[in-house]
Image (spheres, grey):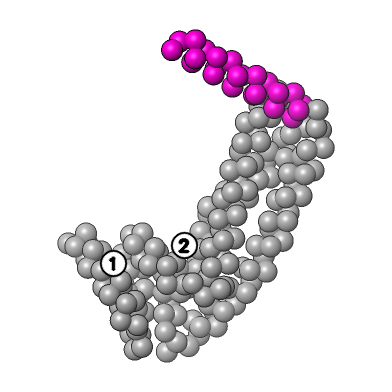
Amino acid sequence: MNELIQDCGEKVLQALSSILDRLNKYDNFSSLMQGVGLALLTILIPFAIAVLTDVLQKKKDETIEYSKLDLHVVLDHVFEVKHLIFFIILIFLPSLLWGILFGFIRLILLIIWIIGVILVGRKLRHLYLWTKGNVFDLRFSYLKKLTNKKDIVIVWHSVWQTENINILDAKQFFKIFSKKIDKLI
């Protein structure tokens, strides 16, 4: 058993060594990292403009169903601006440090960059789902996570003032609402 563990450990170290050798050969890899980051931002910006324009137009007319809820969902759940800024830093910081740092640290930078790309990709997926019209899953998940008491009053008022609620959606809203009330009590 010890030999098996030792053999696996040696193979992992050889694989890491091989990856490090390849990473150290590519000085222009930082350009590739920046290019991917810029491509993601290029996709993100038009989505953001389209979604925010739509939601802000709805907000002007409070008779539109879920107008305030949608604004909160988009800003606090779909975009999560604080997180998005951090994710973008995860993408661009490694590319800036790539030329300065070498060896094992480049592997760490690569991992950080991959995490940033994945997290921004998830944000793009949420924006895509919102734009496509799959908003109820995002609304429900936002309402489940919501803890700010001031926001709770605003968004639930937006939900309950809606006149034409689908019965299945109403049941899901009620489940979330009752759990939230139980938790607050």
Residue that sits furthest to the top in the current view? 3
Q: Is 102 situated left or right of 76 in this image?
A: right
Q: CA distance from mark 1 to mark 2?
A: 16 Å
Q: Is residue 122 magenta?
A: no
Visible residue check, residue 157: no
CB atoms of marks 1 and 2 within 8 Å: no
Residue 149, by quadrant, is bottom left
Residue at 65% x, 45% y: name it. Answer: 91
Residue type for callout 1: Ile
Residue at 37% x, 67% y: name it. Answer: 140
Q: Residues within 10 Å of mark 2 (few under 14, many from 20)?
A: many
**Residue at label 2?**
77
Q: Position of residue 181 (x, y in %)?
A: 22, 66
Q: Is residue 2 magenta?
A: yes
Q: Which mark is residue 176?
A: 1
Residue at 54% x, 78% y: name it. Answer: 56
Residue at 65% x, 24% y: name it. Answer: 15
Q: Position of residue 110 (x, y in %)?
A: 66, 36
Q: Which residues are magenta?
A: 1-24
